């Protein structure tokens, strides 16, 4: 993450208030701003300047009742989201609507297992096994080549019926025109036997129990401030998945908003 003018400006404004100093609010991360950050008691003295800057955004967010997560000086989706809220609040004096954490529906009518290898193998079989072709109730478009139409894809046989019910309900609820308009048909893949990015555990895609939608506009590290599927207009769509016990990593963890899985956290 790079500290941009908008980040530094907010930090300068808040430092002026917090420390009763008089920094020029110019977005320039110079010596005066760095020195001021070094005098903030709550920030670890051993941290570098940038880490202190991020830590100060977290600290200020938390003090304003906006959950930025742990005060660790690291930029993640939670901090990015908190920054957007804090920035708007500081500019306007009004908390943006819909900024609070979403409470996803957490029921489990199909008894999806917990997301760990033992439970997943017991429930779904070995990675890559027990796959069945799902005929889609409405055509999907390949997210990386939108002219290509997908009429079916492979998924785990255990989730087959549930997935079919979800997609049928999406079609009934929205109709094909609205589905296209909202990009609910932009398919980013299901079965894919691979390790989690940056880890050695199997991705839930390895069992064919996870689906990605519209990855371009819901990138892995994007949080609520940026991901398309975090917008209120998608609440009903998420509700259809959650009624069947499916889990959105976006709705529960605020990252990887493209990803929906039949495994509990
Ligand atoms: Zn995924």
Image: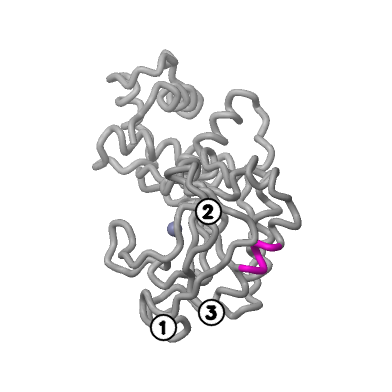
Does the closest atom of ligand 1 sit within 8 Å of the Cβ of label 1?
Answer: no
| Gap in angstroms between the C-alphas marked 2 and 1 | 26 Å
Question: In this rendering, would 194 be left or right of 237?
Answer: left
Q: Please state which of residues 139 and 79 is positioned toward the viewer in this rendering.
A: 139
- Way the structure is coloured: one colour
Residue 125 is tagged as 1
Magenta stretch encompasses residue 82: no
Could you tell me if residue 52 is visible in this image? yes
SS under mark 2 = helix
- Residue at image position (40%, 18%) is 27
Rendered residue at 49%/45% (across/down): 218
Q: Name the residue at 51% across, 65% down.
A: 261
Q: Secondary structure at mark 1?
A: loop
Check disc 2 and report the residue beneath it.
250
Label at residue 184: none
Question: Do we see residue 78 in this rendering?
Answer: no
Residues 78 and 46: in front is: 78
Q: Earlier in the sequence, mark 3 or mark 2?
A: 3
Magenta residues, start to end: 164-168
Q: Nearer the viewer, mark 2 or mark 1?
A: 1
Q: Pointer 3: what residue?
A: 158
Horizontal arrangement in the rendering, residue 207 relative to residue 31 (left or right): right
Which is more N-terminal, label 1 or label 2? 1
169 vs 36: above or below: below
Where, by quadrant of the figure, is residue 31 drawn?
A: top left
Query: x%, y% of residue 166?
Result: 65, 65
**Beta carbon at label 2 within 8 Å of ligand 1:** no
Q: Is residue 13 left or right of residue 174?
A: left
Mark 3 vs mark 2, foreground winner is: 3
């Amino acid at each position: 993450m790079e500290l941009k003018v908008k980040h530094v400006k907010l930090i300068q404004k808040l430092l002026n208030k917090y420390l009763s100093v008089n920094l020029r609010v110019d977005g320039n991360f110079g010596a005066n701003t760095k020195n001021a950050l070094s005098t903030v008691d709550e920030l670890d003295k051993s941290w570098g300047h940038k880490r202190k800057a991020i830590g100060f955004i977290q600290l200020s967010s938390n003090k304003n009742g906006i959950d930025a997560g742990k005060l660790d000086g690291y930029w993640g989706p939670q901090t990015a989201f908190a920054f957007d809220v804090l920035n708007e609040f500081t500019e306007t004096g009004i908390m943006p609507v819909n900024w609070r954490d979403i409470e996803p529906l957490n029921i489990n009518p199909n008894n999806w297992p917990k997301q760990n290898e033992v439970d997943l193998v017991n429930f779904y079989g070995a990675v890559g096994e027990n796959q069945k072709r799902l005929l889609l109730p409405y055509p999907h478009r390949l997210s990386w080549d939108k002219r290509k139409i997908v009429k079916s894809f492979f998924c785990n046989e255990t989730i087959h019926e549930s997935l079919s019910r979800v997609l049928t309900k999406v079609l009934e609820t929205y109709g094909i025109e609205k589905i296209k308009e909202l990009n609910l048909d932009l398919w980013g893949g299901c079965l894919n036997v691979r390790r989690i990015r940056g880890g050695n555990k199997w991705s839930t895609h390895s069992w064919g129990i996870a689906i990605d939608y519209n990855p371009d506009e819901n990138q892995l590290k994007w949080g609520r401030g940026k991901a398309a599927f975090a917008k209120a207009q998608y609440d009903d769509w998420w509700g259809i998945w959650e009624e069947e016990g499916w889990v959105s990593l976006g709705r529960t963890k605020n990252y990887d908003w493209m990803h929906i899985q039949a495994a509990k956290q």
